[in-house]
Image (spheres, rainbow, N blue to C red):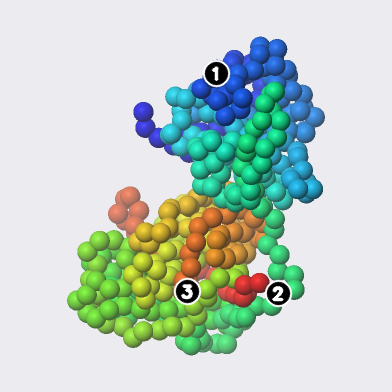
């Protein structure tokens, strides 16, 4: 059996008909980290407790479905963690669905629901120390391991690990930015910005940004007559882009930033530019998306790549116009390893309600051990990975080829508006 698609995994509020699912989960195999199976009476009481706490709003228990088939259970309830109000999460997945991404998809959905609830900033989990799968799941979904303990449980002792997910809002109180770029000087500050899109894989002439600056900020523009930036390596993709660094090798070499596919060759030698290269701290941008099926806007710092492995990406916001609708849209956030062997892909699309073609704030708080992502100041994701090298900013609008192969020039220009970009030094 293959992996379950995230779109097939759904959470349905626990109902009166779900007692048989508890029975399926009450086997020696499924309860080996919890002290063994419960009695029929204990199981009935658990089922009734789920229904009662759901009705009272003291807990939120769900059945996990995959394509409509019951696959397990998951939920959260009120608790205290070291004297701080928190929510505790727990889950179980039936054996036939284990190892297929079901628990990961279900827990990510649960995290979204807890974050939307917004009443408590901490989500905690206490899997048994020997439960390798659940401990790995916590680490994979942004929880931080904070210690372990032992407590009485079902007539014995349960040794557990403590995992904590900090969902608190971005706190900039008492912090001053070390640089604020408002693009309001009448021209682009080329001591900070290089107005070309990875020109080493093409040329400065072919990859030059079209833009306007002024009191409104920055507008990156793709016009009806804008040509593909690199037909050789990227087909009919058009881009208008600025970045804050440039590193590549001599013409004919394969040395260069953002090696987005195999077989790339430097076509035009470029000067090295080390312009605005933060290393930890807060990075934020205020920008607006474009609602057109061929448009995509993004802000995605990448490693400067003076060392080939230092090439990971912090995707602060990636928004496809095809994924916007009347009530909101999807924003891609997370870490992409590109070709950094020390990183793993941890990227997801977060649903945001509201008009994303209006200005919104997208930010990360980045330190040596984790990266926290925010939209309009609210936490949306944590990536507990170590990306420990300077990054340069990549800020752009794309005009992507569609399935028909036809480009409607009458719907251009695309105008990507950015009000500001800011950085705050680490605490």
> Where residue 339 is drawn, which disc sits there?
none
Q: Secondary structure at mark 2?
A: loop
Residue 225 in sight here: no
Q: What residue do we see at 60% from left, 49% from top?
A: 145
Direction from residue 326 to residue 399 in the image, left or right: left
Q: Earlier in the sequence, mark 3 or mark 1?
A: 1
Residue 340 in sight here: yes
Direction from residue 221 to residue 155 in the image, left or right: right
Direction from residue 34 to residue 84 in the image, left or right: right
Say which quarter of the image contains residue 1: top left
Q: What residue do we see at 59% from left, 21% from top?
A: 36
State the residue in front, 362 or 292.
Answer: 362
> Across the whole image, how many numbered discs are drawn on residues?
3
Cβ atoms under marks 3 and 1 closer than 8 Å: no
Q: Which residue is mark 2?
A: 175
Q: Is residue 290 above or below residue 46?
A: below
Find the distance from the CA under tag 3 to the CA under tag 2.
21 Å
State the residue in front, 42 or 64.
Answer: 42
Q: Which residue is mark 3?
A: 390
Position of the C terminus, as image quadrant, is bottom right
| Viewer-nearest of discs 3 and 1 | 1
Q: Earlier in the sequence, mark 2 or mark 1?
A: 1
Find the distance from the CA under tag 3 to the CA under tag 1.
50 Å
């Amino acid at each position: 059996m293959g992996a379950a698609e995230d779109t097939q995994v759904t959470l349905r509020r626990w109902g009166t008909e779900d007692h048989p699912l508890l029975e399926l989960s009450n086997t020696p195999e499924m309860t080996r980290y919890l002290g063994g199976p419960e009695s029929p009476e204990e199981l009935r009481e658990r089922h009734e407790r789920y229904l009662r706490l759901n009705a009272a709003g003291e807990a939120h228990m769900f059945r996990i479905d995959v394509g409509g088939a019951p696959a397990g259970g998951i939920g959260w309830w009120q608790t205290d963690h070291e004297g701080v109000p928190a929510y505790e999460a727990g889950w179980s997945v039936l054996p036939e669905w284990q190892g297929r991404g079901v628990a990961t998809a279900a827990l990510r959905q649960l995290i979204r629901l807890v974050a939307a609830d917004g009443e408590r900033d901490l989500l905690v989990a206490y899997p048994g120390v020997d439960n390798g799968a659940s401990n790995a799941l916590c680490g994979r979904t942004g929880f931080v391991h904070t210690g372990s303990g032992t407590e009485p449980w079902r007539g014995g002792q349960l040794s557990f690990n403590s995992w904590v997910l900090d969902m608190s809002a971005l706190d900039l109180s008492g912090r001053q930015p070390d640089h604020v770029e408002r693009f309001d000087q009448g021209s682009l500050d080329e001591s900070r910005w290089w107005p070309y899109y990875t020109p080493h894989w093409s040329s400065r002439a072919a990859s030059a940004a079209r833009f306007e600056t002024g009191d409104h900020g920055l507008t990156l523009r793709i016009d009806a007559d804008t040509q593909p930036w690199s037909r050789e390596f990227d087909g009919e993709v058009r881009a208008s882009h600025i970045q804050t660094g440039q590193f590549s090798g001599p013409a004919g070499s394969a040395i260069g930033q953002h090696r987005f596919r195999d077989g790339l060759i430097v076509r035009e030698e470029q000067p090295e530019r080390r312009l605005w290269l933060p290393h930890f701290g807060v990075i934020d941008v205020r920008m607006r998306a474009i609602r057109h099926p061929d448009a995509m806007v993004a802000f995605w710092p990448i490693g400067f790549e003076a060392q080939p492995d230092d090439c990971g990406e912090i995707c602060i916001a990636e928004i496809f116009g095809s994924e916007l609708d009347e009530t909101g849209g999807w924003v891609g956030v997370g870490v992409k390893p590109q070709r950094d062997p020390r990183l793993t892909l941890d990227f997801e699309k977060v649903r945001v309600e509201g008009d994303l073609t209006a200005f919104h704030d997208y930010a990360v708080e980045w330190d040596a051990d984790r990266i926290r992502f925010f939209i309009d100041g609210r936490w949306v994701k944590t990536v507990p990975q170590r990306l420990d090298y300077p990054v340069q900013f990549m800020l752009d609008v794309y005009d992507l080829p569609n399935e028909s192969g036809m480009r409607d020039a009458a719907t251009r220009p695309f105008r990507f508006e950015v009000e500001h970009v800011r950085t705050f030094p680490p605490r």
